[in-house]
């Protein structure tokens, strides 16, 4: 079964440092998303990406965040200057075009900002 | 504001039936989804209701009433492996499929 692949599985970074979280969505999927989940809390929407551009972003997705699809397969989330409150599990997800279908989530990257 | 309400915890025994309710209040609504998440794992898509009524997928069924802004997930013949958190999520973004998640219901299945 096709999978969404995320790397790294766990990243520890110092406050103020830049991090890049990487994702390889399922190849025939056209919609891509980043969500995050602070430990023990609900999954929160960050950004959606379609046709090589951001289609929507949440209030969480401020100027410190950016996304890229640099080569047609990878989908990255960059946080320019991490804050303690950015510590969370970050999930990449994708879904195919057409009638609404469920997301396929990656296994996530646990980001710890110290 | 946008909100989804679901119980925080439910406990049931193996073989039983459990219903997890979800009420929502969102600015847009295109459908209600359910996701399962085991501890430390990724959310896994279970079902989607775009229209009123019942959708059945094996031991799991999901129901939607748009007029009542209400839905539920029904799990039958519970198994120990069903112990997980279950999230309802509203698709408010139409074809973009953007989701707002509820806070999740932690289901514990006892022997």
Image: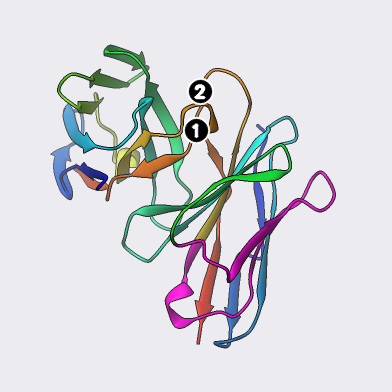
Chain identifier of the residue bearing label 1 in the image:
B
How far apart are the two marked residues, 1 and 2, measured between alpha carbons? 7 Å
Q: Residue furthest right?
A: A71
Mark 2 packing: few (<14 Cα in 10 Å), some, or many (20+)?
some
* Residue B61 seen anywhere in this rendered image of the structure: yes
Residues in magenta, as a range: A60-89
What residue sits 39% from the left and 52% below the top? A43
In the figure, is residue A113 to the left or right of B23?
right
Q: Position of residue A12 (x, y in %)?
A: 58, 80
Have a look at marks 1 and 2 and say if they share a chain.
no
In the figure, is residue B90 to the left or right of B11?
right
Q: How is the image coloured?
A: rainbow
Element under label 2? loop
Q: Position of residue A19 (x, y in %)?
A: 65, 74
**What is the quadrant of residue B54 in the picture?**
top left
Q: The C terminus of chain B lies in which quarter of the figure? A: top left
In the figure, is residue A31 to the left or right of B54?
right
Q: Are marks 1 and 2 in contact (CB under 8 Å)?
A: yes
| Residue at which label 1 appears | B97
Q: Where is residue A26 in the image (x, y as percent from the top left)?
A: 70, 37
Residue A48's place in the image compared with A90, above or below, is: above
What residue sits 50% from the left and 30% below the top? A102
In the figure, is residue A89 to the left or right of B4?
right
Q: Is residue A106 magenta?
A: no
Q: Is residue A82 magenta?
A: yes
| Residue at which label 2 appears | A100
Element under label 1? loop
């Amino acid at each position: 079964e096709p999978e969404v692949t995320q790397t790294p599985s766990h990243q520890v970074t110092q406050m103020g440092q830049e991090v890049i979280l990487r994702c390889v969505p399922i190849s025939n999927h056209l919609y891509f998303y980043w969500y995050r989940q602070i430990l023990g809390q609900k999954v929160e929407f960050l950004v959606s990406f379609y046709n090589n551009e951001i289609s929507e972003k949440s209030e969480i997705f401020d100027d410190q965040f950016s996304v890229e699809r640099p080569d047609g397969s990878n989908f990255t989330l960059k946080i320019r200057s991490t804050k303690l409150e950015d510590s969370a599990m970050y999930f990449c997800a994708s879904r195919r075009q057409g009638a609404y279908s469920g997301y396929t989530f990656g296994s996530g990257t646990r980001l710890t900002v110290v | 504001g946008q909100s989804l309400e679901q119980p925080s915890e439910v406990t049931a025994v193996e073989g039983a039936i459990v219903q997890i309710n979800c009420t929502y209040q969102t600015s847009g609504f295109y459908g209600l989804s359910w996701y399962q998440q085991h501890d430390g794992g990724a959310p896994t898509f279970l079902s989607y209701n775009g229209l009123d009524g019942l959708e059945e997928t094996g031991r799991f069924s999901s129901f939607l009433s748009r007029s009542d802004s209400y839905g539920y997930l029904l799990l039958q013949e519970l198994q120990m492996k069903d112990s997980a958190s279950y999230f309802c999520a509203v698709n408010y973004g139409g074809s973009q499929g953007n989701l707002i998640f509820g806070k999740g219901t932690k289901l514990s299945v006892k022997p």
